[in-house]
RNA sequence: AGCGGGAUGGGAUAGCCAGGAGAUUCCGGCGGGCUCAUAACCCGCAGACCGGUAGUUCAAAUCUACCUCCCGCUACCA
């Protein structure tokens, strides 16, 4: 890659985060795809050779789980969603140069090549970990095949993620009280050999990488804490059938068991689809047109090369420009895991990561479970043009900011900017020109207008180089705004009789401006820009025209145009809001029924388990009396107990232990009424090494039992400081 | 608690990195003009002491320090 302004002489790849083949798309999802498409088109407008690629993410446990629920094969399940996505994107004018999926041959081969490279370079090691297992079905339970209690916040959680509680990513083996989602039975843990990618090998490299990275500031800053701290190694295999097989090494290590049964973790093969999809594009159009290897491989340091953080080597290589466009929920995957994966296999590194904010609905987060969402299909069914939502999502606020969507705001933007400013200017100009001159009058562009168009072009180029789609879109609309002002100021309708030459001049300028608006708005409004282009009597596609086309003479002949955009009426908004409310209500009613049912289930569950509560087996390893003596247990009295802000469970307590008052951090915040604790006697481990949790020093441990953190106390009159033995 | 991002007229936004006249743009409010155009467009007015306090400077929304409040992200059962 280079760090020169776009366009560079290198080919570029723009990618979108892979949609997961497991559900429908709503307009929140669409934000990154629309932005990716608009950005790729904008790069091409600058003259940058660009391939825009992505693909569906087919693997992983959610697909396997949901396929099983439906009684279909994971492949059929994922493929159905893949086809739906591939069909939906073009309806929003999102046109990938290649849209593949992770289960195809190209990605499978490439992924296994990556893994072999890591193994060759000794970045992979084996470790035995505890894996949840369904004893009845005799099958391992990776990720979402198991549900249980989050070890961090105590909420109900899935095996790979605490989805309802603290949102934390869970590594295999971490979840507590695991239950199989297949049979509903309690799961047990079994020891299994798994493969890990040693991320710590790339720590120094990543420090250099993150400083070179362009794009949005959140993508650069958020992973700093990981990269500059201690990197945990990434478990790259799972016990399941659905996925890409871990490449067998002809079983040299002779343990015979594991590798055959292991597939790669979905986050291994998913980003590699970026490469695979680029490769498929090359295979289709030929390396002369687009060379995926030049983008992804050429010029990158060899794997194992020692120039870890050598900026020179990276920034001066003439390879390709890789730009990833993602949601901000997967920043770490693209700024920690992914560059490590690339580096480990000797590939080029991304030049930029653009991490978008989320889309909210009337101020609150989208909720698919509550059906509080505007679905892609709903939007289309309402008959709205895709360019409207493209405009809204790309030009409302900065890319990394969250965007709030409401039908009311949507109406305001569409009516004010697209209908009032852009559409109206184009329409009035072309209509006037067609009626009076049957096209473009005989004149030349005035210096004022061509200067203004050049300014818009510069704004557009700067915007692309600053990774700002909003400013790129604004450049086009602002130019139309100028056009409105220009035509109003010159009043050509008053000139046709008195000063026909001047009138021709003004209208020529307006047609030129309309043409420039078509060129500049094409990335954001691909369909409407093309319509305008055709209205201008232009041949071919506006998307093949470079920015300089904005200054070229418009065709001499064209007829009366149609209106580009339609106003959205107030009562339409009311109607849409009512529909949205109704669907939320319907989902809420359905959920209530579900909740009633599941409540019943919960009750029976509890009565079932009451008799045989899960009790951890007694540890067989006996310790000596001396070892026990090492523990300094004391009675203490709680003086202060207050929550630690930002922590779900932690509380800061001060405990009087006779000789002194200790500050201890304890995970009891949600389980106790903290106000009632002062005065209570407790048992603490007084000689535990100090630790810092959430920045608060913890000097000892407060003993408590079980999930409910039942605090140990005394029943006699032993005072603070009394030793427990 | 740490780290990151914010706090700018009624609402929403830009400017801040590379300090410079009475601070941008859009929506909304008020008034006017015009009529080629989708009753739209154009012009004008009102409205912000640029979160607070101190400092650097001839000059600060912009730099520095401290503080307040919001949002996000973290090695959360010691």
Image: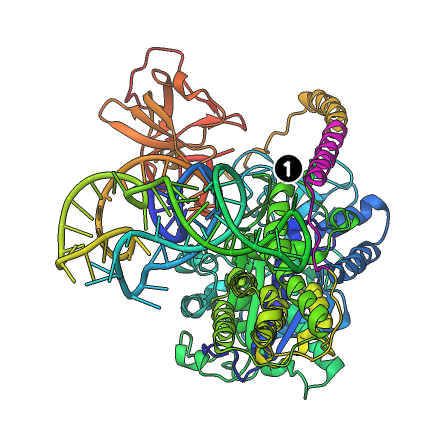
- In the figure, is residue A349 to the left or right of A496? left
Q: Residues within 10 Å of mark 1 (few under 14, many from 20)?
A: many
Q: Is residue A532 visible?
A: yes
Q: At 39% from the left edge and 33% from the top edge, which residue is drawn?
A: A644
Q: Is residue A246 visible?
A: no
Is A572 inside the magenta-drawn segment? yes
Q: Which residue is most to the top? A: A716
Q: Which residues are magenta?
A: A563-590
Residue A145: x, y in percent? 71, 45
Q: At 67% from the left edge and 74% from the top edge, which residue is drawn?
A: A543
Residue A248: x, y in percent? 70, 70
Type of secondary structure dominating the magenta stretch: helix
Q: Which residue is mark 1?
A: A148
**Nearest to the observer: residue A706 or residue A311:** A311
Image quadrant containing the C terminus of chain A: top left
- In the figure, is residue A633 to the left or right of A275? left
Q: At 65% from the left edge and 83% from the top edge, which residue is drawn?
A: A291
- In the figure, is residue A315 to the left or right of A596? left
Q: Which residue is most to the bottom? A: A288
Secondary structure beneath dot 1 equals strand
Quarter of image, res A308: bottom left
Residue A210: x, y in percent? 43, 66
**Nearest to the observer: residue A572 or residue A44:** A572
**Nearest to the observer: residue B78 or residue A532:** A532
**Nearest to the observer: residue B58 or residue A260:** B58
Quarter of image, res A550: bottom right
Q: Chain of mark 1?
A: A
């Amino acid at each position: 890659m280079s760090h020169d302004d776009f366009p560079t002489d290198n080919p570029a790849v723009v990618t979108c985060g892979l949609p997961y083949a497991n559900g429908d798309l709503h307009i929140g999802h669409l934000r990154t795809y629309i932005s990716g498409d608009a950005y790729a088109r904008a790069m091409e407008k600058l003259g940058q050779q660009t391939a825009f690629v992505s693909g569906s993410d087919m693997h992983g446990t959610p697909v396997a789980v949901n396929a099983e629920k439906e009684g279909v094969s994971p492949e059929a399940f994922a493929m159905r969603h893949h086809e739906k996505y591939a069909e939906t994107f073009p309806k929003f004018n999102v046109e990938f140069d290649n849209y593949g999926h992770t289960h195809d041959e190209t990605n499978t081969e490439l992924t296994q090549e990556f893994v072999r490279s890591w193994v060759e370079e000794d970045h992979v090691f084996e470790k035995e970990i505890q894996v949840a297992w369904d004893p009845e079905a005799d099958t391992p339970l990776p990720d979402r095949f198991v549900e249980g209690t989050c070890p961090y916040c105590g909420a109900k959680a899935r095996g790979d993620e605490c989805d309802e509680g603290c949102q934390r990513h869970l590594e295999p083996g971490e979840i507590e009280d695991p239950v199989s989602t297949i049979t509903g039975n309690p799961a047990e843990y079994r020891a299994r050999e798994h493969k890990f990618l040693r991320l710590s090998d790339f720590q120094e490299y990543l420090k250099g990488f993150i400083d070179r990275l362009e794009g949005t500031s959140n993508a650069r800053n958020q992973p700093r804490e990981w990269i500059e701290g201690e990197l945990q190694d990434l478990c790259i295999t799972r016990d399941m059938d659905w996925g890409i097989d871990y490449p067998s090494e002809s079983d040299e290590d002779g343990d015979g068991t594991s590798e055959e049964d292991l597939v790669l973790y979905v986050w291994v093969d998913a980003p590699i689809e970026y490469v695979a999809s680029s490769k498929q594009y090359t295979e289709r159009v030929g390396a002369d047109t687009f060379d995926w290897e030049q983008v992804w491989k050429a010029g990158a340091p060899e794997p194992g090369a020692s120039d870890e953080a050598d900026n020179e080597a990276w920034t001066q290589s003439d390879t390709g420009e890789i730009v990833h466009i993602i949601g901000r929920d997967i920043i770490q995957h693209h700024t920690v895991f992914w560059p490590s994966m690339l580096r480990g296999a000797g590939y080029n590194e991304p030049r930029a990561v653009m991490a978008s904010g989320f889309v909210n609905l009337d101020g609150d987060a989208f909720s698919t479970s509550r059906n509080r969402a505007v679905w892609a299909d709903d939007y289309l069914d309402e008959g709205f043009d895709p360019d409207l939502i493209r405009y809204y999502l790309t030009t409302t606020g900065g890319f990394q900011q969250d965007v709030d969507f409401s039908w009311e705001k949507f109406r305001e933007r569409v009516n004010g900017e697209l209908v009032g400013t852009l559409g109206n200017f184009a329409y009035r100009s072309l209509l006037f020109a067609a009626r009076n001159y049957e096209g473009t009058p005989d004149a030349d562009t005035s210096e004022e207008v061509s200067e203004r168009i050049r300014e818009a072009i510069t704004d557009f180029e700067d915007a692309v180089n600053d990774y700002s789609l909003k400013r790129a879109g604004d450049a086009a609309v602002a130019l139309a705004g100028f056009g409105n002002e220009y035509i109003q100021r010159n009043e050509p309708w008053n000139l046709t009789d008195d000063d026909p030459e001047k009138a021709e001049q003004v209208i020529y300028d307006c047609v030129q401006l309309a043409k420039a608006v078509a060129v500049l708005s094409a990335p954001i409004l691909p369909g409407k820009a093309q319509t305008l282009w055709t209205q201008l009597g232009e041949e071919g596609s506006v998307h093949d025209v470079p920015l300089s086309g904005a200054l070229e003479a418009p065709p001499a002949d064209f007829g009366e145009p149609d209106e580009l955009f339609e106003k959205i009426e107030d009562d339409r908004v009311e109607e849409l809001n009512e529909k949205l409310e109704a669907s939320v209500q319907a989902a809420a009613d359905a959920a209530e029924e579900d909740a009633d049912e599941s409540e019943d289930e919960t009750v029976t569950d509890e009565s079932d388990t009451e008799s045989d509560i899960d009790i951890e087996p007694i540890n067989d390893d006996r310790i000596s009396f001396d070892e026990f003596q090492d523990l300094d247990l004391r009675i203490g009295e709680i003086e202060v107990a207050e929550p630690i802000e930002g922590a779900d469970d932690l509380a800061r307590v001060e405990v009087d232990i006779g000789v002194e008052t200790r500050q201890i951090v304890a995970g009891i915040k949600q389980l106790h009424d903290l106000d009632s604790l002062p005065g209570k006697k407790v048992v603490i481990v007084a000689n535990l090494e100090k630790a810092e949790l959430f920045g608060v020093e913890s000097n000892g441990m407060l003993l408590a039992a079980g999930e409910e953190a039942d605090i140990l106390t005394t029943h006699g009159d032993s005072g603070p400081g009394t030793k427990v033995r």
